[in-house]
Amino acid sequence: MGKVKLAVILVDYNGLEDTIECIESIEKSTVQSQIVVVDNASEENEAETISHKFPDVKTIRSKMNGGFSAGNNLGIRWALEQGYEYIALLNNDTVIAPNMFELLCQYASDTSVSAPKMLYYSNPETIWYGGGKINRKTGNAEHYYMNQVDPGDKTVRKCDFATGCCIMIPASVFRKVGLLDERFFMYCEDSEFCLRLKENGIGINYVPTAKLWHKVSQSTGGDESAFSIYYMTRNRILYIKDHEKEFGPTALAYTVVTRIIRMIQMIVKGKTEWRAFQKGIHDGLVGVSGKTAL
């Protein structure tokens, strides 16, 4: 394909080693890009370290950790101001195939974004994301082919959920639908963004020949941490309420009831993380947003 003007946004928060490995993989890409690293107020000034090691990388040092959405938005705004045509959101705990961006750009346009096949870094032939959907009955964002061995499929397919781990988004799409919603801080911002894409007639192309490898859950302490439980619970309730026309009448009830059941299970096992479920349900229902003390 012809030369494209591409910016790649990485958000770094106390993840210097992962970020360096990710940058090194991007530098092997068949498409030249401007890498933008947003240091989301890491404990050490990781932006400075990255600038010294990679002089061509644009670094932005945030004064505060505003979360995944806010960090990405700092990079997105810079890229839009600089006139980049394509903006790729990419988790810093990933390693990409050299041709990934080239393939993704081919399937991103004014009316579509694109997402690659994502495999486990620790198990490189096993799929973590193979396309996805948002279940209208439950509110769940579901990954196709999760934990299945990569079949080597090559057919590009439409889907209605792309994880924020990696999405190729034309600048024109951001101008049409807006940036990521900063109310969420962490989790579910990708689901909400995908719903806005659909509402604005923007499709999602899953490109299975474009690949990356993801160090899943490495940066957040796993799905059973109080942090993950709270934000996943609260934010799912928030985006279901925001887009109630997209969901059946069961989605909100399903989300609340299943979290109450898991909360009770934790109480029985003596796990203190049950309080994160309780707070997440309450805050989601009353509309609390942003970063919250736990």
Image (cartoon, grey):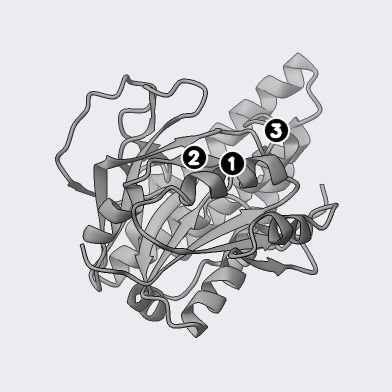
Mark 1 vs mark 2: which is more N-terminal? 1
Left or right: 55 with respect to 45?
Answer: left
Pointer 2: what residue? 95
Question: Looking at the picture, which amino acid does disc 2 mark?
Answer: Val
Q: Nearer the viewer, mark 3 or mark 2?
A: 2
Residue at 81% across / 28% down in the picture? 272
Residue at 82% across / 47% down in the picture? 294
Left or right: 199 with respect to 294?
Answer: left
Q: Quadrant of the N terminus?
A: bottom left
Left or right: 180 with respect to 50?
Answer: left
Q: Residue furthest left?
A: 155
The residues bearing labels 1 and 2 have C-alpha atoms spaced at a distance of 7 Å
Pointer 1: what residue? 21
User: Would you call the spot at circle 1 few (<14 residues within 10 Å), some (14-19), or many (20 or more)?
Assistant: some
Question: Looking at the picture, which amino acid does disc 1 mark?
Answer: Glu
The residues bearing labels 3 and 2 have C-alpha atoms spaced at a distance of 20 Å
Left or right: 287 with respect to 272?
Answer: left
Front residue of this view, candidates 33 and 84: 33
Mark 3 vs mark 2: which is more N-terminal? 2
Q: Quadrant of residue 259?
A: top right
Residue 240 shows in the view: no
Q: Position of residue 41 (x, y in %)?
A: 78, 60
Question: Looking at the picture, which amino acid does disc 3 mark?
Answer: Gly
Q: Secondary structure at mark 1?
A: helix
Q: Are marks 1 and 2 in contact (CB under 8 Å)?
A: yes
Q: Quadrant of residue 260?
A: top right
Pointer 3: what residue? 221
User: Would you call the spot at circle 2 few (<14 residues within 10 Å), some (14-19), or many (20 or more)?
Assistant: many
Q: Position of residue 119 (x, y in %)?
A: 41, 31
Q: Is residue 108 above or below residue 153?
A: below
Q: Position of residue 195 (x, y in %)?
A: 37, 61
